[in-house]
Image (cartoon, rainbow, N blue to C red):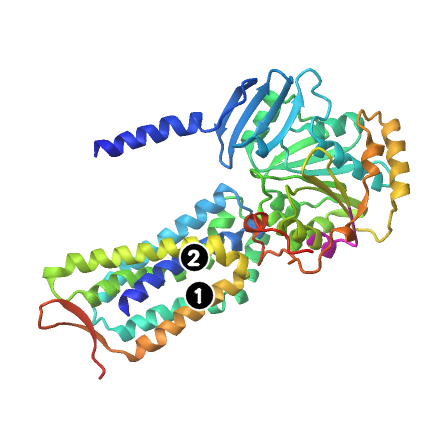
Amino acid sequence: MTRIYYLFVVCFTLFPLQGFALDPSEKMLFEKNSLYQYIQVIEDTAKKERYVRNQKKEYTQGGIYIHAPDKLLFEFTQMSFVSLAFLDGDPKDVLFVGLGAGAMPKYFTGRYPDAVIDIAEIDPDMLAVAQRYFYFKENERMKVHVDDGRLFVKRAKKKYDWIILDAYQNDYIPFHLTTLEFLNEVKSRLKEDGIVVANITAPYRNKFFDSMVMTYKKAFPHLVMFKGKKSANFIFVASASIKIKDKDSIVARARKIASARKFDIDLEDIASRYEPSEIYAWAGAKILTDDFAPVNLYQYQKSGAR
Amino acid sequence: MIKFVVFLCGAIVMSFEILGSRVLAPNFGSSVFVWGSLISVFLAGLSAGYYLGGRLADINPSSRKLSLIIIAPGVLFLTFPLYSGPVSDWIFMKDLGVRMSPLIASSVLFLIPSVFLGIVSPYTAKLMICSLHTSGKTIGTLYALSTFGSIIGTLITSFYLITLAGVNALIMGQGVLLIALAIPLYFMNLKCSVDRSGSVRIMDDTK
C-alpha cells in the first residue's frame, strides 16, 4: 500500500511540472491544464520571442517577437494573409475559428480597422493567455466568442467575406472541423465572393493531408494551395464563387494590397508560391465526413498517392 | 456462452460511448459539456440497468429472457442512423444552451441502450450462480469479464474501427452482433448444474 502511495506522489509531483524539457534559453512564464489542453507560455530569451504551446515545441499555437509584438512571427500566419488577394474588395466581415495567441486578428485589424471581426475560441484560458501575454485586446469591432467553432458557424446568422480556419489541439484539427458537412456550413456563411482559408500542417505527405485536399475540393469549386518554406504548413484558399483567379492576377493583387495596407511581410513572394490543388489531388483519398473522419489515425499513415 | 455475452455487452457499451462522442460533435461540438453529458448519461443508464436487472433476475430468470434483453439494444443500434440525425438536428434547433443541449441529446440517444446493457450484468450473475458457496467467484469473474470487454471495446474502437468504417456503420454492426448473439441464446436453455466433481458449470439443457 505504501508503495502505491509513493508511486502516486512521484507521478503527481514529477510529471506535470517537469514532463516537458525546456531549452536553456527558454523561460516558462505560465502553465495551466485548461479544460481542453495543456497551455504553456514560453519566452526565448536569446531569440527574444514568446510562444504559446501545448506539450511540445511542435505543438506551438502562436507567438510574437517581444520587442515587436505587432509583427507576424510564424510563417503560417504570414502566409494566411495571401488569401486577401483573392478578394476583389476589402473584407468587411471576418471570422476567425481558433484564436491562438491572437497574432493574426491583431495584425489584420491594424491594417483593416474598419472590418468587423468575430473570433470563435473554445478555450477561455487561451483567450486569457492571449490578452495577458500577447497584447491581444478585444474592441468594438473585434469580439471573441468562447464557443466551439462548429457551433459558432452553425448558429451564425451573419455572412462573412473572409473566414480563417485555424483551430488546433496539439498537432491536429478536431475532427468535426475537418468534415465535408462542416465545410458546407462554412460555405453557407460566406458572401458570394467570400474566401475561406485554412492552415493545414503536414510534416510529411500523410493520408490526412490527402483527405483534406479532396474534402476541400468537394466542398468548394476552387482550391489553391501555398506551401510553407520554413514550416510544414500548407495554406488552403478556397472560394465559393465560380470565378477562377490565376497566379498572375493573385501576385499582382498581392503586391497592390501589400503596399496599400503597409504590410511588412513579402505578400508578393508568398503569392508566387500559388499552386493549383490539382497537383496534390489524389482520387484515392477518402473524403472526410461527420460519419467517417479518422483524423488522428490518418495523420500517422503515409499517403497512398504515388 | 453466458460469459461471452457478458464480455461482448461490456465491449459494446464502451465502444458505443466512444462512437457517441462522434455522433454528438457535429451538432453539439466537443466541449467539456459534451463529454460530461455523454459519460454521465452512460453511467446513469448503467446504474438504472443494474438496479432493474437485479429486480428482473429475481423473477424466473432464463437465458431466453436474457436474449430478449439484448435484442432490444440490438434493434436500437441497427436502426440508429434512422433516428440519430433527425433527433440531433431537432435538439440543435431548439437550442437549450451549451449544457442542456448535449445532455438532452445524450439522454435521448444513449440512455435506453445503456439501461438494457446494464441489465445484462446482474441478470447473468443470477443465471450463473448455482451455489452460494461459489457465488463470490462467479460474480467476480463476471465483473472482470464485463470490464475487460469494456477495455477491449474502447481500444479497438478508438484505435482501429474508426479508420475502417463510418460511425453509423459501426453502430449498426454492434446491433447485428447483439442480434446474432441473441438468436441462439433464445433457443438454448442454459441452466447451471453441479457436476460430479462438485464444480459448477453452465450446461446446455436442451439436448
Q: Secondary structure at mark 2?
A: helix
Disc 2: CA contacts within 10 A as few (<14), some (14-19) or many (>=20): many
Q: Which mark is residue B142?
A: none
Which SS class for mark 1?
Answer: helix
Q: Give the residue at x 53% y 30%.
A: A39
Residue A186 picture location, percent across and down: 70, 48
Residue placed most toward the observer, B40 or A34: A34
Q: Chain of mark 2?
A: B
Residue range of the region highlighted in magenta in the rendering:
A215-224
Q: Residue at x 60, y 19 (%)?
A: A44
Across and down, in percent, residue B121 comes to 28, 61
Subunit under mark 1: B
Label located before the other in sequence (1 or 2)? 2
Q: Residue at x 27, y 65 (%)?
A: B3
Contact between labelled residues 2 and 1, with CB atoms less than 8 Å apart:
yes
In the rendered image, which residue does mark 2 sit on?
B15
Which image quarter holds the N terminus of chain B?
A: bottom left
Quadrant the C terminus of chain B occupies: bottom left
Q: Is residue A272 visible?
A: yes
Answer whether residue B120 is magenta in the image.
Answer: no
* Amino acid at the residue labelled 1: Gln
Q: In the image, which disc is placed on residue B174?
A: 1
Residue B184 to residue B154: above or below: below
> How far across and down, in percent of the image, does residue A89 sit?
87, 38
Looking at this view, is A7 or A61 the one in front? A7
